[in-house]
């Protein structure tokens, strides 16, 4: 399967808004976790049936409904009904190849983003789709599988004096999105560090393996770019939205978030051009090394091939080769060898090959 | 004939709006199929004479008139009269090299798009022109030949409970266009998968054939881009149109369609830059391999060429070569060979050529 | 003389609006042809004196005054007076290096365009400047020399039932401009076809000649681009003009013309990037072939150079070389040769060089 | 640690607006220096406690509070309270990887910029973050460590008749920012001079070291660009700000500053493309030199390898080699050698290899 | 000193608006020449003291004050006072590295432009700064040294019937600026011609010198671009200026001037991409030639190295080599040589190396 674009043949010929999972199912049974809090109280529990979350919708407390696993289409359908999500938005959240986007729903702000993670085994960056819905009093997040980057946010919620507890649900949504984007920058920093380290090897230990690594990083940077760049448009669409569930006073946080997105995309472009430069330099270095190899061969060849010919002459069996009969012929020959090879060495020195 | 641009010499010197087929005639007699439906009823038939379709125009049911074969200029002319299509639009639909466009007609919305298909024999992507006209109650589609990507849409129409049956003709037009664009993404996914697979071969089994394949995919990506990119402008023109036969409530579907077009063009750019990277990497690998080849030659040459010279010396027939008379001269010579070649091997080891 | 920019030193130090021909005089005496027509009548004649055309200006019929040869500065000056052309426009039309432009004159619309032709002898595309002036009832065209692409338009005028005869002079202007742009597309198609055919040779018969051809087409594409691209701006300026001699009802034709210009520029960019790709591929192929050549040399060298050394050993004249005295020494030597060369062949097979 | 992007893992999971230093602590105890002046008087002192600066805020004189060292988070927090800086701005000024920006605060204009310096030891350009706050009567600058580019400004303040003394604090802020940007241009000029000097070596003394230098300058240019380019946006944001603490009459200075920023970015792009050209030229030169090396080898090989073969023939021990018995066989052989090698030399001359 | 950016360290730490010459002093004593004219009269003289020009300012005739040499800072200061030039504009005119700009002063229009000249000795293009001030009745031009491109304008002024004499001072300013820009085009034409001529040599006489020339032209084109491109912005700023000393009726000349600037920048981009193509082609040609060289070596090597080995075999001194005793052994050997080399030649023919 292509890594950069997903096979959507399953959805071929279905009506728009049909609920079809594009991508792989990544876990067994979905897990639904709820955090419900205000400044004083915090309830944290795992809930069994999707129906239990209806109460959250009407509570005046802030609820964060966190769902791991989106392959249960009935559940997704029911969630759509409860939170009045548009059919197309449901279709988008199931399409794990959906580009990051902002949906300005009637009773919610919908976000589709990518969470990036580094897979230690494949050495690849992998991307997981995160859907975030911000409504009247709730934040709903949907992820493809267990595990995410939000543990720090959970601790901050548990901390009674944390700013999250004192704020509304839009602040929670901001905190989650900020965590996702912050993670982009962390990942770029980590890839960037490795790219900067290639530099040393390109000049002092270039081997064939290195090309593979350069290509690998080129691809990873492309992969990060693909996930991060559309987030710029998502932010722009959010800023242009006529009404949004972000309070006006928290707009400043969104502006800060936007700056972080821009910082990330700038860094991506920087490393992208750096890795291209490195490939060029590597290529030039390969040519340089070939040059050196060829010089060695040429020097050896140019000196000894003519000499061997001369030796061959005096190895011939003509009946009449006067030189062979000279008493010191051999020594004159040796002297000639010294003169010729010395001359050639001088010639190569003048050409700066030695 | 050029694949990327078609010969329009036939139209040279004709008045604008003249009906001339640019491109090849691809079938014998045009086939006209009609699907006429509302929520309860569906009539599906092949019609013989173009005059029969006049009734569709006035019926309050939704009619889909699907025409395969556009080379019958009289028929095209008559269709233009029946549906009040502008002469220039008729000229455009006959010019199979026409770029995708939206025409904001008085009594219709006209679309010219490209359907892409993969030809198993030539391994090329081929593009066929699709004209779609959305009028008061009808949708008219014109294609160059039999066979298209719309079979799924037909099944959905036949399904009494399908959403198409419950909606107006603009929804049908949307469903058709969505199918066309969805097909772009499927095709890009398929080409993209093959491009990603090249990567393995570039590093571990690069042969000359591979360059040809890389170029082939570069060209296919260019070909897809040529067909898909103008669809962005088409969508923009549609959004800016002052009046359109798309109902306001279905605008959300168009927005979704637009996102799909953008997703397709993004993926095209991504693979386009990936295949360029692959060519660069391949080239660097070729240089790397040449380096390796040269090292082998140089090592053999640098070791044996001087030795052969020395052997040549003692093969000479000078009357007086003192060494030849030594009893152990031969063995001293052999020892010298070992020393010299050992020294050279050490030298190459120090240079990291071994 | 530079082909892409013309020497304007003749105009150095003259006042703006001075009438100076920049470019070569290409014929002897200017030829002035007149076609004057309405729906019923057509007068077609060659006129001697420039003064005769004054009557055209006031006639209510459509007149097309077609002038071949612009080097007669007095004539140009007089034309400027008759049709009230601005001095700067006159200067521009004499400067055959003038970029395509639209001039929104008080009593006329002025256009400067490039007609492209393929010169069979030099295999180059050549560009000739066309000035078109659209006034109240007349169309005035000025060209550098005899011969143009308008013969089809002339036939259509002669055809009593042609649409041109039924329309005003703005339609004639449109027909002429459409012919010019149509010709661009024909030319691009022809160059494009040749570029696409290079592909075959790049992979299966690459020789040094090919680089020259690739460069040739790169240059021709640049040359076409230089002439065609500014036509986009010309069209934009025309659309933005506050008043123009194009009737509102014919605007649709201009839109069509504009689309054709865009189609042409898109095709130019496509072929431009294709020819660049071809050069890269060619270069990679050259490296590939060098690799192959080097492998042959290396295999021969690595096998026979050591063997020759061994043969050299037994050609030495040491008094005491025990092997030489063995009865089967020679056959043992031959067996050794087989073993060594077999081993080396195996080695090269393992390296996939064979 | 990556040089182009900083590790922000320390800030992971903290609330926005939390005060965390991203980057290294570069000195021990912060140093706070104050210059307080009007046209007549100047007080210049180092102050111990941050509380002393409260008086500055209310004084009608111009105060420049210059702080070296930003790692004391309590101090930063207190400064934020005194000058009513927004928490996000405080977070930004502590994040030394923050991109240059303008913050339009309620009671201040905040600027984050980069000061560039050339480190003689590492031969790298290093960037230090400068925060500048312009309020009612004060200018506050914060830097990461001791030492800056502002000594000239200090002298001008001490000069009673200097224009700074006669102007308000916005003029001081302008003078500081102008100094920072002027320093960019100085640095680019210095790097540019070195880049221009590479040219000579590329053509006349290209060695492997040179690639490393080319890459080095490519990287430095990238580094400068990263610091300077966002300053363009900073200036734009400032011009668009609805209210600002820059007086209208001093706007002309800002326009001048903006021009300097544009000049700097233009020069960066120029040198960036020049260094890329240099790498290409260098690579072409390497190929050229390899060509020359190969020619030498080929000429030697092609002349002497066939001759050696012929000598080998007459060194064979067949019982019946008629030529060997000719009296002048040897001399005929020598003549043959002269003829063959002369012919080959002629051949190479014709190929222009000699 | 860097050629593309000038050392401004002299201005370091000075107040903005300080008068400091950036760049070299190029002559001794400034020369001030005055042309004062109306339709009937012309006074032309060299004036000694700057104070004499005050009268010009108030005269109703047109005065052109032409100053060669800007290093006399007192004089510049006095000029600033007389013509009420802003201090920043004075600073800019002294900074000979100032980018071309338009300054919309209260009582003047200020222009800073670059005059380009070709230095025959260094084969470089050199740029000199021209400052042009257009006020109520005067035009003031300042240049770095004696000699300019304005001699033609002077002749036209001396010509009583010239259009300049009949027009106001804005027309004079236009004529001067037009001359400067016209000169750009002349220079580009001259460089372009040389670039087009390289083409021939790249294919038929490529030597190492050629790379140097290609790089040289690349640099010159960059240098021209640097001076010309900002003139586009200058023209735009002028068009947007709210009030200007150009009369409305002369706006058409400015439009024409603008077109010339655009023509120049287009031509620059064209030649810039052409010279890059040429470098690529050259590089490909170098590889092609190396290929050819390698083929020659390989053919010689592959044919004679095995043959030499065979000759070596029969030169061995084994006591028992049966073939040596055959009467016709030698002739069989020769026949074998013919067969082997014939076979190899066939092999190379099949590979298309011959």
Image (cartoon, coloured by chain):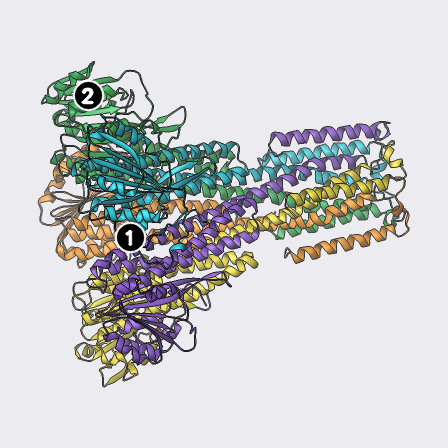
Chain colours: A orange, B green, C cyan, D yellow, E purple
Secondary element at tag 2: helix
Secondary element at tag 1: helix
D315 on left or right of D16:
right
x, y percent for residue C183:
34, 35
Give above or below for E236 relative to B30: below
Viewer-closest of A108 and B169: B169
D186 on left or right of B184:
right
x, y percent for residue E147:
41, 68
Q: What residue does disc 1 label?
A: C88
Whether residue D94 is visible: no
Question: Is the residue marked by circle 1 packed among few (<14), some (14-19), or many (20+) residues within 10 Å?
Answer: some
Give above or below for C234 relative to E148: above
Q: Quadrant of residue D308?
A: top right
Q: What residue does disc 2 label?
A: B78
Q: Quadrant of residue C189?
A: top left
Give above or below for B140 relative to C62: above
Q: Quadrant of residue D261?
A: bottom left
> Badge 1 sits on which subunit?
C
x, y percent for residue C315:
82, 40
- Frontmost of labels 1 and 2 is 1
D349 on left or right of C157:
right
Whether residue C218 is visible: yes
Q: Residue at x 10, y 42 (%)?
A: A55
x, y percent for residue A175:
21, 53
Viewer-closest of D316 and E64: E64
Looking at the rendered image, the quarter that the N terminus of chain D falls into is bottom left
Residue B295, label in figure = none
Give above or below for B162 relative to E305: above
Question: Is the residue marked by circle 2 packed among few (<14), some (14-19), or many (20+) residues within 10 Å?
Answer: some
Mark 1–mark 2 contact, CB under 8 Å? no
């Amino acid at each position: 399967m292509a890594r950069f674009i997903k096979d959507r043949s399953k959805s071929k010929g279905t009506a728009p808004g049909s609920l079809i999972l594009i991508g792989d199912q990544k876990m067994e049974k979905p897990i639904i976790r709820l955090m419900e809090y205000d400044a004083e109280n915090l309830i944290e529990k795992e809930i069994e049936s999707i129906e239990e979350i209806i109460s959250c919708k009407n509570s005046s407390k802030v609820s964060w409904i966190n769902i791991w696993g989106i392959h249960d289409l009935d559940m997704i359908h029911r969630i759509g009904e409860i939170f009045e999500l548009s059919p197309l938005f449901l279709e988008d959240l199931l399409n794990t190849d959906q580009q990051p986007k902002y949906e300005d729903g009637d009773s919610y702000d919908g976000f589709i983003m990518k969470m990036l993670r580094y897979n230690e085994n494949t050495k690849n960056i992998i991307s997981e789709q995160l859907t975030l819905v911000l409504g009247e009093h709730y934040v709903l997040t949907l992820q493809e599988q267990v595990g995410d980057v939000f543990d720090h946010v959970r601790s901050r919620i548990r901390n009674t004096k944390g700013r999250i507890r004192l704020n509304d649900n839009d602040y929670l949504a901001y905190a989650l999105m900020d965590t996702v984007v912050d993670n982009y920058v962390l990942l770029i920093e980590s890839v960037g560090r490795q790219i900067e380290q290639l530099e040393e090897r390109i000049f002092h230990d270039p081997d064939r393996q290195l090309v593979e690594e350069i290509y690998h990083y080129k691809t990873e940077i492309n992969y990060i770019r693909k996930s991060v760049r559309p987030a710029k448009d998502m932010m722009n669409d959010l800023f242009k939205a006529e009404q949004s569930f972000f309070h006006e006073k928290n707009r400043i946080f969104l502006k800060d978030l936007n700056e972080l997105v821009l910082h990330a995309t700038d860094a991506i472009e920087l490393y992208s051009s750096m890795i291209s430069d490195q490939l060029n330099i590597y290529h030039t270095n390969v040519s340089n090394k070939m040059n050196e190899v060829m010089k060695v061969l040429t020097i050896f060849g140019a000196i000894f091939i003519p000499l061997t010919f001369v030796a061959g002459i005096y190895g011939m069996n003509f009946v009449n080769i006067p030189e062979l009969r000279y008493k010191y012929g051999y020594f004159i020959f040796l002297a000639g060898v010294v003169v010729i090879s010395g001359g050639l060495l001088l010639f190569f020195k003048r050409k700066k090959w030695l």
